[in-house]
Amino acid sequence: MKRIGIVAVLLAAIAVVAFVVLRNGEETLAPVYQKVPVTSRDIVVSASAAGSIEPITTVEVKSKASGELYEVRAETGDLVSAGALLIRVDPRVPQNTLRQAEADLELAQAQLDNAMSQLRRSEELFGTQSITEQEYDTAKLSVASARAQLVRAERSLEDARIAAEDTEVKAPITGVIIQKNVEVGSVISSATGNVSGGTVLMQMANLDTVQVRALVDETDIGKIQPGMPVTIQVDAYRNRPFTGRVLKIEPQATVTQNVTMFPVLVRIPNPESLLKPGMNTEVEVHVGSREGVMAIPNAALRTQDDVYSAGAVLGLSPETVQEQLAAARQAAGGGNQQSPGEGAVDDGTVMWRGTAVKLPQGLSADEVQAVLAKVEGASDMRSVFQSLSDRERTVMRQMSEAAGGGMRPGGGMGGGQQRSTSSTSAALLGGDYIVFVMRNGAPTAVPVKTGLTDLDYSEVESGLTAADTVLILPSASLLASQQQMQERIARMTSGVPGAPSGGPRR
């Protein structure tokens, strides 16, 4: 009996609280919308990332000659011109080989001269039948052999000269020495005569123009395009930003700690060589900016998918919302525009969820209207979609793709970021939406065209004036939670004496 009494007391307390909430709902419940005036503001869209300075071109300096280093003329940080002497290798062996090649050439030339003299005498003797034909042919063969030996000697001399010149290692490009691996007295191996590739003597890079390999989050990569301006800051020069442009976006992502990033290459002029390879940078890609434009919060934007549910929160029926949108389009377009679902426009497009979309091949305007009639204004889109035939689902998919992937705003009090699956320009330049404004003291649905958008605000290109006030409504999930709470309280208090039987008053 004691437990039953406690339960009764708790039920009574709940009933009293519910009764007070329901009876005083108009005074205690927060308003279902927030009024925000259209304001003038700057909208800047950028993507931030981190990266490091890299040289565009890096060259490894090696030697074709092997041996001990006699002289090293360059140090790290030196700016050298192409062809400047960097390192001298022990030249004694190549020079000896060169002298031997010169002597072999003289011998080959003398042998050729002697063979030619013998051939002339053999021709005279053969003419007087003093020697046989075989002896005459032998003289000619001796000349040919001596000429071949001369060619070999000339080739050996040229190779010896090249080997002697290779003892002087010269700069292959104009640039800065960024790394030095050897000192005077080091013994190096040839790059051409060693299977390992030879000894790397130095590394050079041209730092007149450098690049940054920035890792951009996958949520921002859709905003970035080659050629966009970029601002870079390094810790060494905090008060001096450097400017550049996006070169390209690498197609292969990198995943670090379950975060997907894409490398973005940025080219930066560096005429003063202030930016050094390896410097950490803060990269900001300037996607777009607008100054002093009319703007509204992204949370106020509605698509054709959720405009009727938002209108229901404000006490507007789907028919009323359609009439308001049709009237607004009539006033804006001089009577030539149509409301959603009205069919084909003269230019071969159809109105699909408030946007004029070119009719895809294989679809008719009547077919599109029939699908719109089923889905527009539906409170439970999931059940409606399940009831559609395969052909009707195909129509919805093709129309959604033709409309650009269906960009959606945040739709909640906290705002949201617009995303596009069709093109970067669409994601940056907004699109066609619907907002609710207070006109003549009543909420009114108005179609608007937005421009550049950031995480919080969107530029208004048409549909509103500076004197308008837009309404921000709760998110659909919040409305559903409130409705479920009201129904739960109504069920709990349904049998309590003195409690109202209906739901909360609006």
Image (cartoon, helix red, strand yellow):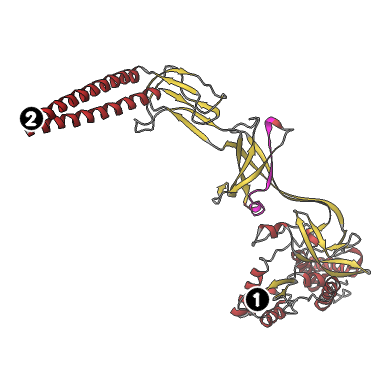
Residue 346 is left or right of residue 328, and the answer is left
Residue at screen point 52% across, 27% down: 179
Please, what is the three-letter code of the amino acid marked with disc 2?
Thr
Q: Is residue 226 visible?
A: yes
Instruction: Point out the tag, 1 or 2, that comes first from the N-terminus.
Output: 2
Residue tagged by mark 2? 128
Residue range corresponding to the magenta coloring: 219-236
Q: Is residue 458 above or below residue 448?
A: above
What residue did someone put label 1 on?
A: 385
Measured from the top left, where is residue 387 in percent x and y? 64, 80
Percent coordinates x, y for residue 122 in the rendering: 12, 28
Would residue 299 appear left or right of 236 to someone viewing this image?
right
State the SS at label 2. loop
Could you tell me which residue is drawn at 57 percent across and 24 percent down? 77
Quadrant position of residue 110: top left
Instruction: Give above or below for 468 relative to 195.
Output: below
Q: Relative to the observer, which residue lies in front, 423 or 22?
A: 423
Please name the amino acid that badge 1 sits on. Phe
Disc 1 is placed on an element classified as helix
Q: Is residue 337 magenta?
A: no
Query: Relative to 191, is 315 on the left or the right?
Result: right
Q: Residue pushed farthest front?
A: 128
**Mark 1 or mark 2, whichever is nearer to me:** 2
The reply to whether residue 30 is in sight is no
Closest to the observer, 191 or 418? 191
* Quadrant of the rendering where the N terminus is positioned: bottom right
Query: x, y (%) of residue 107?
Result: 23, 21
Judged left or right of residue 166, residue 294 is: right
